[in-house]
């Protein structure tokens, strides 16, 4: 929850960096080094945040790794880490109130399909070779 809240606070204090944040955290999801992806964002001014952006990036990477290896139940997402990544995208992009989104995550609800469906191998709308930030076009 800490990662998601931090990202939402950042985007509320500096909305013009939405696409840069989304792209950086997508790249972390795809396996890139968080420190390399976030080095330029580290210089940006955010009025509200919980931890330095590099720490949030590393926490994100660790949570993705934990979910990749530690989640043993059947998932509606393939890869299962797409559940967490979908919520990262939604917390950065959505204008919804943070408490409503936190309640949704805490109750195990999936993120909106617009953030995950084309990447989800289990979704009939799945596509390969998507453009960066494909979910922002829907």
Image (cartoon, rainbow, N blue to C red):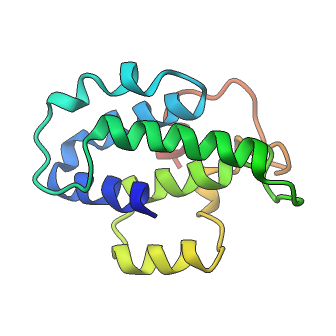
| Residue 75 position (above or below residue 102) | above
Query: Is residue 98 left or right of 65 when viewed as pictured?
Result: left
Query: Is residue 76 left or right of 64 when viewed as pictured?
Result: right
Is residue 91 or residue 115 the one in the foreground?
Answer: 91
Q: Quadrant of residue 58?
A: top left
Which residue: 89% across, 59% down? 74
Q: Residue 56: image x %, image y %?
A: 37, 44
Query: Is residue 121 left or right of 8 when viewed as pictured?
Result: right
Q: Residue furthest right?
A: 74
Q: Residue 27: image x %, image y %?
A: 51, 28
Which residue: 56% across, 76% down? 106
Residue 9 visible in the shown view? yes
- Number of marks in picture: 0
Q: Residue 118: image x %, image y %?
A: 70, 43
Query: Is residue 138 left or right of 123 when viewed as pictured?
Result: left
Which residue: 64% across, 59% down? 113
Which residue: 51% across, 31% down? 28
Is residue 66 or residue 41 the one in the foreground?
Answer: 66
Residue 137 visible in the shown view? no
Q: Residue 15: image x %, image y %?
A: 21, 50
């Amino acid at each position: 929850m800490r990662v998601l809240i931090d990202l939402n606070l950042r985007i509320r204090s500096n909305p013009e960096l939405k696409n840069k944040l989304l792209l950086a955290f997508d790249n972390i999801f795809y396996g890139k080094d968080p420190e390399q992806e976030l080095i330029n964002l580290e210089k940006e001014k955010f009025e509200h945040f919980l931890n330095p952006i590099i720490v949030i990036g590393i926490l994100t990477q660790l949570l993705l790794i934990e979910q990749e290896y530690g989640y043993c139940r059947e998932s509606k997402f393939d890869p299962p880490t797409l559940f967490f990544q979908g919520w990262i995208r939604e917390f950065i992009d959505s204008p919804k109130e943070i408490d409503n989104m936190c309640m949704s995550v805490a109750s195990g609800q999936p993120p909106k399909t617009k953030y995950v469906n084309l990447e989800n191998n289990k979704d009939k709308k799945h596509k390969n070779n998507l453009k960066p930030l494909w979910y922002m076009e829907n």
